[in-house]
Image: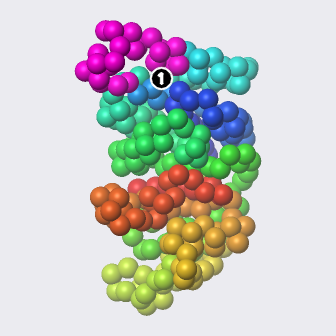
Amino acid sequence: MAIKDILAVVDTGDTDEQFLHDALAFAEFHDAHLSIVILSALPSADYALTIVPPYSFLQDYTEAVEAKQQRIAKLAGASNVEVRTISDQPAIIYGKAAVYARYADIVLFGPADNYDYPPIRRETIERILFASGRPVLVAPNGHKPRAIEHLAIGWNATREATHALRNATTFAAPGAKVDVLVLDAQPSAKGHGSEPGADIAHHLARHGFMSSVVPIHATALSDAEALVKAACERGVAVLSLGAYGHSRLREMVLGGVTRDLLGGASIPLLFSH
């Protein structure tokens, strides 16, 4: 399926100019409609009233949104870009962003340091993944869009990895090369089978993709670092990953690949749940 509807998510900060350029270039490359949603998290009314006169705090947030809209309009120029704003409590923002995401083929986020409020960025990504059914692409600054003729999938034989593979191959060029990265995998009747990665590689081949199974061992690296390192060494256009194969609470306490990589990496990361 071609990418024809793109949603890019920003906040009211001013450190994301490169990401905005990248989102515009991504939409132009795919000849797709681009919507940009601005997240403007408001403090609670009780909190606001303790530090400023009633409702005066709203003016600062309104001015920040207007300034961001003007920046986007200037960067977009004659491009046909739809700009939306969600100004509300964080919990409401997450839900509304997930609804908007349902009407896009893919949702773009820049690296965490492009945002003034990284925790709100992270929570928004998580809600989109869990509630929209759409994939999230986190691209490094300066990413140049290109046809996906070579991609990698972090394969652990889970439901989430299956969704990640489906989304990645949906956007990939026909006959693309797919590297199946299996990390410290063990044979299992309930998952990998007798030869980790072999079954999914055969499945890909039947669909016309050139597939290779790439065993990875984390050794001194974290699982996330090992996957990104292997993908970079293979020269792929994107690394596709199933998001939150474990619960979010477990990843908050013990860590996990998703939580480690949501901030971004040196290559584009396509998350699916």
Q: Is residue 183 above or below residue 224?
A: below
Q: Secondary structure at mark 1?
A: strand
Q: Position of residue 266 (x, y in %)?
A: 66, 57
Q: Position of residue 130 (x, y in %)?
A: 36, 49
Depth check: give the residue in front, 3 or 154. 154
Residue at left offset 46%, top offset 18%:
61
Q: Is residue 104 above or below residue 222?
A: above
Q: Position of residue 120 (x, y in %)?
A: 42, 39
Q: Is residue 182 above or below residue 166?
A: below
Q: Is residue 217 above or below residue 58?
A: below
User: Horizontal placement of 14 versus 160: left or right?
Assistant: right
Depth check: give the residue in front, 180 or 265. 265
User: Mark 1 = which residue?
Assistant: 85
Residue at left offset 71%, top offset 25%:
75
- Please state which amino acid type lies under the numbered disc 1: Thr
User: Horizontal placement of 55 versus 23: left or right?
Assistant: left
Q: Residue 64 lies in magenta, yes or no?
A: yes
Write down the region rendered in magenta.
42-65
Prevailing secondary structure class for the magenta stretch in the rendered image: helix
Q: How many marks?
A: 1
Q: How is the image coloured?
A: rainbow
